[in-house]
Amino acid sequence: MSDTNAVVDALSWTCPAPLRDRPRVVMGHGGGGAMSAELVEQILLPALAGPEPAPLTDSAVVELGGARLAFSTDSFVVRPLFFPGGSIGDLAVNGTVNDLAMSGARAAFLSCGLILEEGVGIDTVTQVAEAIGAAARAADVRVVTGDTKVVEAGHGDGVYINTAGVGLVPAGADLRPDRVVPGDVVLLSGPIGLHGVAILSERENLAFESDVRSDCAALGGLVEAMLSVTTTNLHVLRDPTRGGLAASLNEIATAAGCGVVVQERAVPVPPSVAGACAMLGLDPMYVANEGKLVAFVAREHADEVLAAMRAHPLGAEAAIIGEAVADHPGMVVARTGLGGTRVVDMPLGEQLPRIC
């Protein structure tokens, strides 16, 4: 029998959907959605910004000694460390390589910082290091410097990794969201949702009808194939990681000041991902990817770029999924298979935390 006189401590309650006005950091601040954007724009940028505002892109393009360099850094805290299709080591290399590729650059050099928790197995560290080396060789990039720190037991999660990278930006490439104009065609390099569902299935020990493997891959070669068609008419690239395709499209629409219309049936969603999302109440548009990109291309070159993507192994299932429009600037909408329209909002936090 319940005690009707018991005192209820409402301050101890937690909310599964993090509130945006909390005075402390919550998991949603790391999800790549609206809460992440607020943290960056309201706290970090005012403290760190230089005399000129920098665009909030996957990597910064800077000039040094007459060369245009792309520079990026990323940290990886995925749980579990190993999952179907990859590991934290693969993510650490491919994630930074892909951030550079979204500026058109082919990664040349990486740094690698390891934060190890006291008590983690040396065999685990060995596996992670071997995965980093194998992924770097596959991406044709060199890890040239690094650092290692150890924190007390209980103050980490086995292994955290930070990687930074630099690469040369080819002449003529100018990939920025503010170059998007109404009429641009939206291309997607392949099926979405595989990484997030693979992480979830391993983390929660869920079994689906078919195995789901992460799409973790380095996209530098695919981007080179696209740039070989056109540099000037490839307007922006984005890899839809945290927050999924929905977050990437919203970020581009907001920065470009135009609307985006997506044909929902044109977005490739593997049956295994669709089934898992239906069972768990997730929307595949918001599930993370680690080996896909979305591109906005001038209409006159869209078919040629699509053909170049499909000729590359990582773009074999590429598709046209929508277009940029002058209507509803800053908003993404999806045309459903039933002829209706729904708004695809920027996610607030993250449906699946700790996925990269």
Image: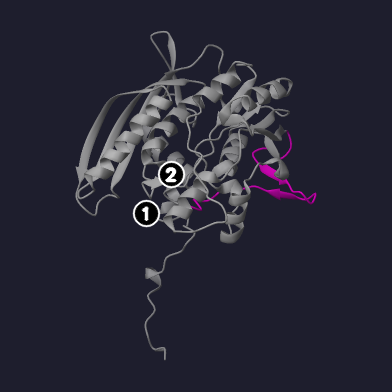
Q: Could you tell me which residue is drawn at 69 percent across and 44 percent down?
A: 333
In the rendered image of this protein, does residue 5 appear above or below residue 97?
below
In the rendered image of this protein, does residue 185 appear above or below residue 243?
above
Bounds of the magenta span?
A: 326-352
The residue positioned farthest toward the bottom in the image shown: 1
Q: Could you tell me which residue is drawn at 50 percent across and 28 percent down?
A: 55
Disc 2 element: helix
In the rendered image of this protein, does residue 163 appear above or below residue 286?
above
Q: Main secondary structure of the magenta part?
A: loop
* Quadrant (top left, top right, bottom left, bottom right) of the C terminus: top left
Task: Specify whether 354 is left or right of 285.
Answer: left
Res 327 quadrant in image:
top right
Is residue 245 part of the magenta span, yes or no? no
Instruction: Estimate how packed mark 2 is, as few (under 14), some (14 to 19) or many (20 or more) residues with alpha carbons within 10 Å.
Output: some
**Which label belongs to residue 24?**
1
| Residue 66, position as x, y percentages in the image | 42, 8
| Residue 27, position as x, y percentages in the image | 41, 53
Check disc 2 and give the amino acid type.
Leu
Disc 1 element: loop
* Quadrant (top left, top right, bottom left, bottom right) of the N terminus: bottom left
Instruction: Estimate how packed mark 1 is, as few (under 14), some (14 to 19) or many (20 or more) residues with alpha carbons within 10 Å.
Output: few
Res 330 quadrant in image:
top right
Task: Specify whether 276 is left or right of 109.
Answer: right
Query: Coloring scheme of the render?
Result: one colour
| Residue 239, position as x, y percentages in the image | 53, 34
Q: Which of the pair 331/340 is nearer the observer?
A: 340
Check disc 1 and give the amino acid type.
Arg
The residue positioned farthest toward the right in the image shown: 339
Whether residue 243 is visible to the viewer of this picture, yes or no, is no
Q: Could you tell me which residue is drawn at 63 percent across and 50 percent down?
A: 271
Q: Which residue is mark 2?
A: 39
Res 109 quadrant in image:
top left
